[in-house]
Amino acid sequence: MSAALDQIFVSGKQWLLSWLAGAPDWVIQIASSLINIFALLGVFLTLFALMSVLERKILGRIQNRYGPNRVGPFGLFQPIADGIKMLIKEDIVPARADKIVHFLAPVLIAATAILALGIIPYGRGMTPFTIDGGILFFFAVGSTTELAVFMAGWGSNNKFSMLGAMRAIAQMISYELPLIITVLPVVMVVGSLMPNTIVAAQGGYALGFVPRWFVFTPWGATAFILFFVSGLVESNRTPFDVPEGESEIVAGHMTEYSGFKYATFFMAEYIGMFAITGLATTLFLGGWHAPIRMLEFIPSYVWFFAKLSTLLLVYVWLRGTLPRTRVDQIMNFAWKFMLPMAFTCIVAAAVWHYAGRGPAGWLWSLAVIAAVYFTLSILLDTRRKFAPRTYRFAE
Amino acid sequence: MNSVAFIVIAIFTLAAGLAAATLQKLMHAALSFAVTFVGIAAFFFLLGAEFVGLVQVFVYIGAVAVLIVFTILLTRRDVEKDRGFNWSGAFIAIAVFGGLIWAILKTQSLSVAAPEIPALTVKRIGEVLMTNYVWPLQCVGLLLTAALVGALILVMEEKQ
C-alpha cells in the first residue's frame, strides 16, 4: 500500500506513456521529457503562488498585522488577483533602453532558474533529468543568472539599474565561491556528482536511530550553514538584498521593469530560492529519506517537500527579523569568514573519512572546525578597533 | 536524429558567431559571443562529453562572458563608432581558416573509424586528472593563484 503510494507519480507517468506504446523511440523520449517538464512547472508555479501569499501572511504575523485577507478564504486567492493585476498592467519600456536586451533579460533569468530545478531528486525514482554531472549542471546553469542580471541592468539604460546589477553581480560572484566549495566535501565523501547517488549515500541509520544525513556530522553541519547563507545571498534575499535596496537605488536592476516582466523577475527569484533550498535538502538533509525508521511508510516526496518548506519558512523568518546589511559588510563576510570556513569543511571531511567515519572521526573533524572557527573569530575581532570612519573617495 | 540536431546547433552557433563579429554595438556583440559559447557547449553534449559541455557553460558563460561584458562597461565610452571594414582582420581570419582546413584534410586519421571508447564519466576524468595529469593540473593551479595575487596587489597599491 505505502509502496504503491510512494511510486504513484512514477506509475502515473508510465501509464501515460503506455498510451504511446508502439510509437518510435524518439517520440516516447520526447513525450517522457515533456511530462517531466509540465509536472515540474505545475508543481513549482503552484508552490510559487502559495509561497507568495504565505510569505506575506507570515511577515504580517511577525510584524503584528493581518497580511492579505480580502480575496477568498484567509486571502488564499490573493495570487490570482496579483496575477491578473500584473497581466493587465501597462508594459513600459524606456525610450532610451536597449529594447532587445531589455526584453531578453527576464526571459533568460526565468529560464535558467527553472532549468536548475531539473536535476533534484524529489522522491524515490523521481529525478526529472538524470545527468552524470548533475551538481555541476546546477551551478553551470546558475552562473548564467549573472549575465541575465547584467543584461537587465545595462539594457534599462538607467543608473539605478546599472548600480543594482553591479551590486548583484559582485555579491553573486563572491558568494558563488563558498557555495560551490561547501558542496565539495559532500561530493568528496560520496564520490559522485549525481544527486541520486548523494541521496542514496545518506540512507540508513547510524547507531540504529540517527539518520546518516550529512548535516549530523560536524563538517556537514558547518557546510550546511555556509551553504544556506550563500544561498540566501545568491537569491538576493534579506538580509543580503542590497541589489534592490529600495531606500538607495529604487529597485536595482528591476527599476525599469513593469507589469508582467517584473512578475517574471519576481518569479525567477522565488524559483531560484526553491532550487537552492532543494539542493540543500538533497546534499545535507538526506533528500527524500525519512528521519525515523518508524515513519518510513510516509511517501518519499512528502518528506522532501516537508524539508523544503521548513527551509523556506526559515527564509521568510529571516526576512521578517533581520535588517539589511551594508555592501562592504557582505563582501568582508564572504572573503574573510565564509571562504576560509568553506575550505576548512573540506579538510574536516577528509579527516572524518580517514578516521574511519565513526565517532572518532566525528570528534576529530569537530576539533578541526572548532580550531579554525576560534582562530578566525580572534583574527576578525573588530570590537576594540573602532576608529573614526575614513572616506577614501569623498573628501 | 543526431545529424538533424547537429545541423540545427551548427546554424545556431554560426549565426551567433557571425552576429558577434558584425553587430554594431559592442555590448550586443559580446552577448552574441556568449550565445556562441552555448552552441559549443551543445556540441559537446551531442558528442556525449557532458563534463566538458558543463564546464564550457560554467567557465565561458559564467566567468569569461561576464568578464568581457564588464571590461567593455568599465573601459569603453565610444562604443558606437563605425570603423569601416577591417581588411587585415579579414585576411588573418581567412589565413587561419585556410590553414586549419589544410591541416584537417592532410590528417590520415579522418578516414579511420572512431574506436569504441567507454562512456566518459566525471569519475574517470577526475581519476585521470589526479594521476596522469597531476603536474599540469598543479601548474595551472599555481598560475591562476599567481594571477589572483597579482590582481590583488594591483588593486592594493593605491592605499599608499
Image (spheres, helix red, strand yellow):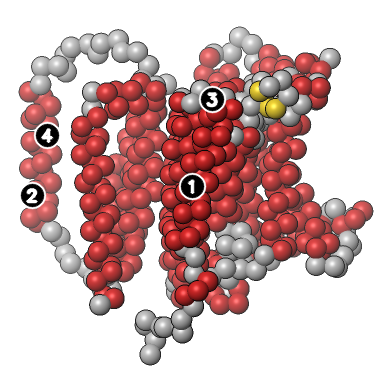
Within 10 angstroms of label 2, few (less than 14), some, or many (20 or more) residues?
Answer: few
Say yes or no: labels 2 and 1 on the same chain: no
Is the same chain shared between marks 4 and 2? yes
Amino acid type shown at disc 3: Arg
* Callout 3 touching callout 4 (CB < 8 Å): no
Residue at image coords 43%, 38%: A347
- Disc 3 designates what residue? A357
Count of picture labels: 4
Secondary element at image label 3? loop
**Which chain letter matches label 3?**
A
Q: Which of marks 3 and 1 is in front?
A: 1
The residue under the point 34% across, 59% down is B69
Q: Residue B100 — which label? A: 4
Q: Mark 1 lies on which chain?
A: A
Disc 2 element = helix
Q: To which residue does mark 2 refer? A: B91
Task: Find the distance from the CA under tag 4 to the CA under tag 2.
Answer: 14 Å
Residue closer to the observer: A86 or A237 = A237
